[in-house]
Every structure is written in C-alpha cells, then in structure tokens.
Image (cartoon, rainbow, N blue to C red):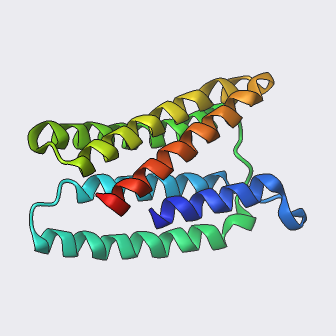
Amino acid sequence: MASISLGTFVGTVGEAHIGGNTFATDWARSFGACGGGLFIFLSSLVKSHDQMQQLKRWQVVEMALFLIVILLTPFYPPVPGPQVSLALNACRMIIYTCAFVRYATLYVSKSTRFSLIMSLGFLVLVIGYAFNIPGILQSKLAFMTIIAASVRIIAYVTLLTAYSIG
C-alpha cells in the first residue's frame, strides 16, 4: 500500500506542477501502482512463513528500486503518446484484475470478510482504471480521468478498510 500511495502522491505532484516542476511522473506513478498491487497479490499466494519472509525481502528491493525511480524522475522523458499511457494503464489493470480474481477465489473458499472487501476493492480499482481509457485516447474526455480518479480513491479507501478491520 505504501508504494501505491507514494506513486500516487508523486504523480499528483507532477500533474499539479507544484513548484513549477515539469517532471514526467507517470513512470513513477505506474511503477508504484504496479509494484504495490503485485506484492499485495503475491502476499495472497503465500503458503508459509518462510515464503512471506522471502516476499518481504523482495519488497524491500522493490521499494529501493522505486525510490531510485522517483529520484531519477527529473531525467525521464515525457510519456510519448497515448499508446504508452494506455500500456501503463493496462499493466495496472492486469495486476489488479489478478488480485481481484485471487481475493474473490479466496472469498469463495474461505468466506472471510477480509477477502470479500479486498476483492471488492480490486474490482473497483479495475473499473477506475477502465474509466481512464477514454480520457487517454481523447483529450476532450478529460472529465473521465476525474471520474476515474474518484472511483480509484473509493477503491483505495476500501483496501485500507480491509486492512484496518480485516
């Protein structure tokens, strides 16, 4: 969740051009969202304490790489076009869809409140990223990206709720 949050924050700062920056923060935002979602998904697959410890070590490596990506943000070129933006969006959608399917499967087999809330949160995230697609393909539909962001905020709050009350 931390890398998802940090990626979203960096992306928002980049889009707001706070301090006059013109950094290409889409790369860091995507890295954080994909890395965070991937590790949440992988943690649902863990079967032993040793596997969890190994996953935590890999997550530390991922976070170190993520911090490097953030520090190098001033040197990245802007996203070249809608095709790359669409590909970055698709990566997030694929990872979050895998997480949705995994947590939905866990809910069907174990019927825990945590797996239900997590599956709903990831489903809403996939819907939120799907709402991004029209805004990526046509700049006149920028209001769709605002709707998409609002839906994703609801999804992130849902995931946080799952961890809080899970």
Horizontal placement of 72 versus 56: left or right? Answer: right
Between residues 2 and 114, which one lies in front from this camera angle?
Answer: 114
Left or right, 142 with reference to 131: right
- Percent position (x, y) of residue 1? 44, 62
Of residue 107 and residue 26, the one placed in the foreground of this image is: 107
Res. 137 image quadrant: top right
Residue located 37% across and 62% down the image: 164
Q: Quadrant of the C terminus?
A: bottom left
Relative depth, front residue between 140 and 62: 140
At 15% from the left and 42% from the top, the residue drawn is: 111
State the image coordinates of residue 120 (x, y, percent, origin top left).
Answer: 36, 38
Q: What x and y, as percent, mark residue 98?
A: 31, 40
Extreme-right residue of the structure: 20
Q: 139 above or below 129?
A: above
Q: Quadrant of residue 45?
A: bottom left
> Compared with residue 107, is residue 159 higher up or lower down, i.e. above or below?
below
Give the left or right position of residue 87, taking residue 22 as reference. Answer: left
**Residue beneath the point at 49% across and 64% down:** 3
